[in-house]
């Protein structure tokens, strides 16, 4: 039995959640609009915004959960991976709160938490399952044998899938973060209008940097011939690029499922909100006889509920950390 306060501050969302005995009572997220005009996350500005947001977000999480501060029995926080300055704000807050109230501290790996978000609501996946974790910084196929027994069996050699979406959006002149906008425009477009190359990477790894370059040259050449090309073909370009990113991801996921003889398959991370990925995954599941797990939208992108649920499973194991802990921009899986 435990009531846990969880803090997430690895990138540009400041989030706090309260979890009671594995049930999420609140999940408050402050998104930082300050980065939009720069076309990407500015680390220094992110740290400052976390510093401003963290206390109001925690207060909101506590009042939304209708609990008192004194009911909190442990504090979970994202130790990494992420932007160091951003992680420092959440880590310092968690340490201060735990020290003041004499509570145990629980460190959480952000990438584990994206996967464990599947244990917030039913249907909860059966072990072992494969999880395709696709975010702004990572693209991984993970073999999940148990809550904390996970192995990366495939990952990107260069850009992450979310970066591929965001960089495409930038080339097309769309504002940051571009992934959701490309998704929205793609819904109106024809996915076979243009053909973008598929990288030939052996094994279960990915590469997205070649795709970015090919989109850049494609747009440059087409614009030379017709200055209105972009304007007149935006939805078809978005649909075609999204189709390519999704087919690259799912081809490797299918290969992994066959290689590891696993038929329970999940997706996680910001890009798992993508409508194309969700649809193609359902289609592939029907063909391959998979049981698939697709997270609710609010648990795809960064949030503290996933940190809380990961913290809860660590709490049950008595897996606590000391006050001497520091965050890690890069963190072993
Ligand atoms: O997991 P996340 O919130 O943060 C990281 O840990 O990186 O993922 C953010 C990424 C961004 O690249 C964003 O563009 C992408 O997820 N994203 C999407 C969609 N929603 C978020 N990409 C494609 N389609 C979407 N609907
Ligand atoms: Zn994330």
Image: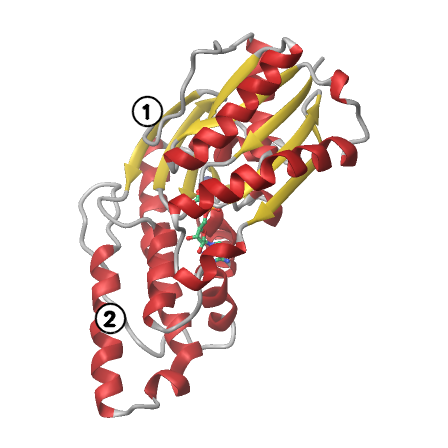
Instruction: Name which residue lies at 35% across and 52% down.
Output: 161
Residue 246 as seen in the image, left or right of residue 57: left
At mark 2, the secondary structure is helix
Residue 204: horizontal and vertical position, in percent?
A: 26, 41
Instruction: Name which residue lies at 33% across and 51% down.
Output: 251
Residue 145: horizontal and vertical position, in percent?
A: 44, 23
* 257 or 151, nearer to the observer: 151
* 166 or 34, nearer to the observer: 34
* 320 or 323, nearer to the observer: 323
Residue position for label 2: 216
At mark 1, the secondary structure is loop
* 66 or 292, nearer to the observer: 66
Instruction: Name which residue lies at 57% across and 41% down.
Output: 52
Q: Quadrant of the C terminus?
A: top left
Question: Assess mark 1: CB under 8 A from ligand 2?
Answer: no
Q: Assess disc 1: are there few (<14), some (14-19) or many (≥20) residues with their C-alpha within 10 Å of its C-alpha.
A: few
Identify the mark at residue 332; answer none if there is no mark: 1
Residue 178: horizontal and vertical position, in percent?
A: 44, 62
Residue 293: horizontal and vertical position, in percent?
A: 55, 41
Q: Is residue 146 above or below residue 318?
A: below
Q: Is residue 286 above or below residue 235?
A: above
């Amino acid at each position: 039995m435990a009531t846990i306060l969880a803090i997430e501050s690895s990138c540009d969302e400041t989030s706090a959640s309260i979890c009671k005995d594995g049930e999420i009572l609140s999940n408050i997220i402050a998104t930082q609009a300050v980065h939009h005009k720069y076309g990407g996350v500015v680390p220094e500005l992110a740290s400052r915004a976390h510093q401003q947001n963290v206390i109001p977000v925690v207060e909101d999480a506590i009042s939304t959960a209708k609990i008192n501060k004194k009911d909190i029995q442990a504090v979970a926080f994202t130790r990494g991976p992420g932007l160091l300055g951003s992680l420092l704000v959440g880590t310092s807050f968690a340490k201060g709160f735990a020290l003041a109230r004499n509570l145990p501290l629980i460190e959480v790996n952000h990438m584990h938490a994206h996967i464990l978000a599947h244990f917030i609501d039913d249907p909860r996946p059966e072990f072992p399952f494969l999880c395709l974790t696709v975010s702004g910084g990572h693209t991984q196929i993970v073999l999940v044998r148990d809550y904390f027994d996970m192995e990366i069996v495939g990952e990107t050699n260069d850009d992450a899938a979310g970066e591929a979406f965001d960089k495409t959006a930038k080339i097309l002149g769309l504002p940051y973060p571009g992934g959701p906008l490309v998704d929205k425009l793609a819904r109106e477009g024809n996915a076979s209008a243009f053909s973008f190359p598929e990288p030939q990477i052996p094994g279960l790894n990915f590469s997205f940097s070649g795709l970015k370059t090919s989109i850049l040259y494609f747009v440059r050449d087409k614009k030379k011939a017709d200055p209105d090309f972009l304007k007149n073909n935006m939805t078809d370009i978005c649909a075609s690029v999204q189709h390519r990113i999704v087919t690259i991801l799912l081809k490797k996921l299918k290969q992994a499922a066959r290689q590891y003889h696993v038929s329970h398959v999940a997706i996680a991370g910001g890009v798992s909100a993508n409508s194309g990925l969700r649809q193609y995954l359902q289609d592939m599941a029907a063909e391959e006889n998979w049981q698939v797990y697709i997270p609710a939208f609010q648990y795809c992108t960064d949030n503290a509920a996933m940190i809380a649920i990961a913290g809860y499973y660590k709490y049950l194991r008595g897996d606590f950390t000391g006050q001497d802990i520091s965050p890690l921009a890069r963190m072993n899986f």
